[in-house]
Amino acid sequence: MSKFEPLEFGTPEVAEIREMNDTLESWHDSDRQAHVVQFYEKDSFLVDQVGRFIGMALGAGDAGIVIATQAHREEIERNLETRGLDVARAAAQGRYVPLDAVEMLEKFMAGAWLANCTTARGRSWRH
């Protein structure tokens, strides 16, 4: 049993979580595992969608892992806090796990290939 306290029912955050849950149900098939890819043009869209998805998990007392750049992680954490979630507490409990995208890529991609990889915006993954 988790020591994380779920959100109180009847709050605006819970209504938002239920809305996201309805969306996720359309992606979910109980007989199979799924991998969902979301494309975005604006960072604000990414932050909002990830915040809603991870917020739903944390608000229900579950866990979430975010693999993102430092800037995106900071924005996502602000988004979660705005939703009334205690991100520091969830992280201390090991239920919110923020990971750096560049570090994670370096761990599972071939180093030589990654060194030459650029993003769609023309920036190198390595700084």
Image (cartoon, rainbow, N blue to C red):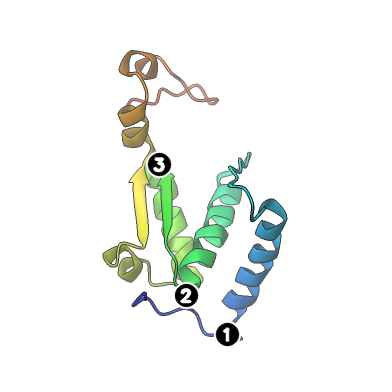
Residue that mark 3 sits on: 69
Cβ atoms at labels 1 and 3 below 8 Å apart:
no
Q: Disc 3 and disc 2: Cα gap in Å?
A: 23 Å
Q: Disc 1 and disc 3: Cα gap in Å?
A: 32 Å
Callout 2, which amino acid? Gly
Q: Quadrant of the N terminus?
A: bottom left
Sequence-wise, which precedes: disc 2 or disc 1? 1
Callout 1, which amino acid? Phe
Can you give x and y, in whole percent of width and height, for residue 9 in the image? Answer: 57, 85
> Observer-nearest residue: 100 or 110?
110
Please, which residue is most extreme toward the front here? 31
**Residue occupying image coordinates x 53% and y 54%:** 50
Residue that mark 1 sits on: 9
> Observer-nearest residue: 30 or 57?
30
| Local crowd size for mark 2, using a 10 Å CA cut-off: few (<14), some (14–19), many (≥20) | some
**Residue occupying image coordinates x 45% and y 54%:** 75
